[in-house]
Image: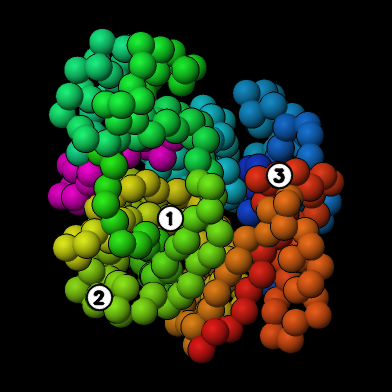
Amino acid sequence: MQIDACPKIAPETAVIGVLGGGQLGRMTIEAASALGYRCHVFAPSGDAPATDIASLSTRADYHDAEALAGFAKSVSAVVCEFENVPVTAMDILAEYVPICPGSKALGIAQHRLSEKNMAQAIGIATPRYIAIGNQVELNRAMTDFDAAILKTCRMGYDGKGQMRLTANNLTDDSFAQMGSDDLILEELVDFTAEASFLVARDQHGQMTTWPASINQHRNGILHISEAPAPADILPPECERQGMAAVKAIAEELNLTGVLAVEMFITASGELLFNEIAPRPHNSFHWTIEGAETSQFSQLVRIAAGLPLGATGAYNRWRMTNILGQDMPELDAAFARPGVHVHRYGKAEARTGRKMAHLNEKIG
């Protein structure tokens, strides 16, 4: 039995469970605290900065059914800050308490081929793609692509688990180099920009969206997001299509919580689906200072059974990611007026690791 509804829970007695111990969990706890709720984090052993500020924490494996059941009995609702949590863990929790985002949304988001198939099934345009299970299939598929990206279907993020291919660099061991037999080959899209769209959907099916973000990446990792997206980059009709798409996906997945979709803007003005994330998203960290209700506060509101908050933007904002190699930039930011610094409390600054972000008003 799954408990679908999120009844209103009073902060005096409620504890919100957070599945995952990373920075998204940490910022969710900060938002929950502002609304008067305590949080209990469930995360495996290791560097989990969300546990530093949680009222309670359980350090156990996501496959530990006994620990999950104990966690569920201690909380009033559960939110997930990490889409690669096993779906079986969410199914166990759903037997006890309301869950966000729901097992269907989590399962689809964990598999790139399933994402693309879902998008196409509900009429959302995608780049050309094909499932790849061996080198022979890869060789055959590459005859139809001038350039493509080979990706692992599972566990790929921030540019990991990807290989750019052309006829010139395709080799007999390209498939083996990926370390998986569950791959997807996607046409390399000639796009002018990438946009992100974010929706919140509560237990009653009510939805709200934030202004779209425009993203810039560096070495496969999001570097800067700016919002609301300017009309010369994301024309109004494209924005309407993107908002309709993210809402349609939320409905299709029976989402409870927040969900982001990344889409390519082509030179011809077409929007093409890239991927989804049924959790708070890096490209909407600007909402902490820049929107009437941040993505994190909205997620807490949904878990607590509260009404959805307004999502209008206060002017235009820029969010800049700070990675391990960017720590001097973080230090300098403290001396710049108007910059809001959000550090994640991670113990070690490593190259490519997200350590903090900066929010600043740009208009």
| Residue at the image position 62 percent from the left and 79 percent from the top | 360
Measured Cα–Cα span from mark 3 to mark 1: 28 Å
Asked if residue 21 is positioned above or below residue 313 in the image, the reply reads above
Please state the total of marks drawn on the protein image: 3
Let me know if residue 262 appears in the view: yes
Question: Is residue 203 in view from this perspective?
Answer: no
Q: Is residue 67 left or right of residue 98?
A: right
- Marks 1,2: beta carbons within 8 A: no
Q: Earlier in the sequence, mark 3 or mark 2?
A: 2
Residue at image position (42%, 56%) is 260
Expressed as whole percent of the image width and height from the top left, the position of residue 94 reads: 52, 38
- Any mark on residue 351, and which? 3
For label 1, the residue is: 259
Position of residue 156 in the picture relative to residue 125 (left or right): right
Q: Identify the residue under disc 2.
A: 235
Per the picture, the main secondary structure of the magenta-coloured stretch is: helix
Where are the magenta residues, as a range? 108-127
- Give whichever of 117, 195 is nearer the camera: 195
Q: Secondary structure at mark 2?
A: loop
Instruction: Classify mark 2: residues with Cα within 10 Å, few (<14), some (14-19) or many (20+).
Output: few
Q: Nearer the viewer, residue 87 or 5?
A: 87
Mark 1 burial class by Cα count in 10 Å: few <14, some 14-19, many 20+: many
- Residue 245 is a magenta residue: no
In percent of the image, x 26 and y 10: which residue is there?
Answer: 136
Kind of residue at badge 3: Thr
**Which of the image's four quarters has the N terminus?**
top left
User: Is label 1 in a helix, a strand or a loop?
Assistant: strand
Residue 7 at x, y percent in the picture = 52, 59
